[in-house]
Amino acid sequence: MADIGAQTPFFYIFRERELIYDLFEAATERVEGVGFIGAEEALNRGSSGPMLRASGIQWDLRKVDRYECYDEFDWEVQWQKEGDSLAPLEGIPGGPYENLEIRRFDRIKNPEWNDFQYRFISKKPSPTFELSKQELYVRVEAPKGELGIFMIGDQSVFPWRWKIRPPGFINLQILPQLVKRMKLADIMTILGSIDIIMGEVDR
């Protein structure tokens, strides 16, 4: 059978694998070694999420603030230490895998995990609801980084001040530092590694 082509599909595997290797090398060469950012610079610029973890800092609000039930599961913060444009892209895929592990652990621990009855929440505030006179800042770990909401109440239904901290807009502030002494063709590569959403930036 080997003489009439039984092994041909097996050798096709090597051909396709070599093409994948070439494609992978071509893609990583464009982002590897450009747009370096150090840990201190990332902290000074207020970076968060994959951008901060790509600079070598193990920081995840789900671990730091321990909100909801994240502290009940055994999971690791996905981080890189290279600090170039490739580092955030390597760290991002690890996040969903960790999230799947968290959901799997929760499902085993509580079989009725997905049986929650969602209720309709009206957009109009209740006339009896009143915001106390205080300042409040709440933050969560969003896919792009720290999503924060700052609010000042004044004993009324609506807040006196409402400020949203979008992670993409804050991470974009570091772009001038990343493109220093870089080629013009590298700007889009570096911008892609920041992974911004323009609707979040241009508000």
Image: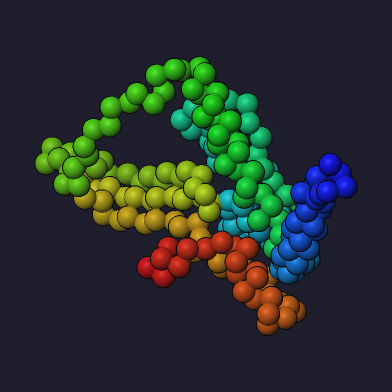
Is residue 188 shown above or below 10? below
Colour scheme of the rendered structure: rainbow
Closer to us: 81 or 64: 81
Counting from the top left corner in percent of width and height, residue 19 is at 76, 61
Q: Residue at x 52, y 63 (%)?
A: 196
Q: Is residue 102 left or right of residue 27?
A: left
Percent x, y of residue 37: 71, 62
Q: Residue at x 73, y 69 (%)?
A: 30
Res 124 visible: yes
What is the quadrant of residue 105 in the picture? Answer: top right
| Outermost residue toward the bottom in this view | 184
**Image quadrant occupied by the C terminus:** bottom left
Q: Is the residue 44 above or below the residue 78 in the image?
A: below
Asked if residue 145 lies left or right of residue 176, the reply is left
- Residue 130 in percent (x, y) is at 19, 40
Task: Look at 75% across and 67% down and name the residue there.
Answer: 26
Which residue is situated farthest in the left direction here?
Answer: 127
Q: Farthest residue toward the right? A: 3
| Residue 54 in view (yes/no) | no
Image quadrant of residue 172? Answer: bottom right
Q: Position of residue 38 (x, y in %)?
A: 73, 59
Residue located 47% across and 63% down the image = 197
- Where does the N terminus fall, quadrant-wise? top right
* Tally of numbered discs: 0
Q: Is residue 7 left or right of residue 178?
A: right
Residue closer to the observer: 77 or 93:
93
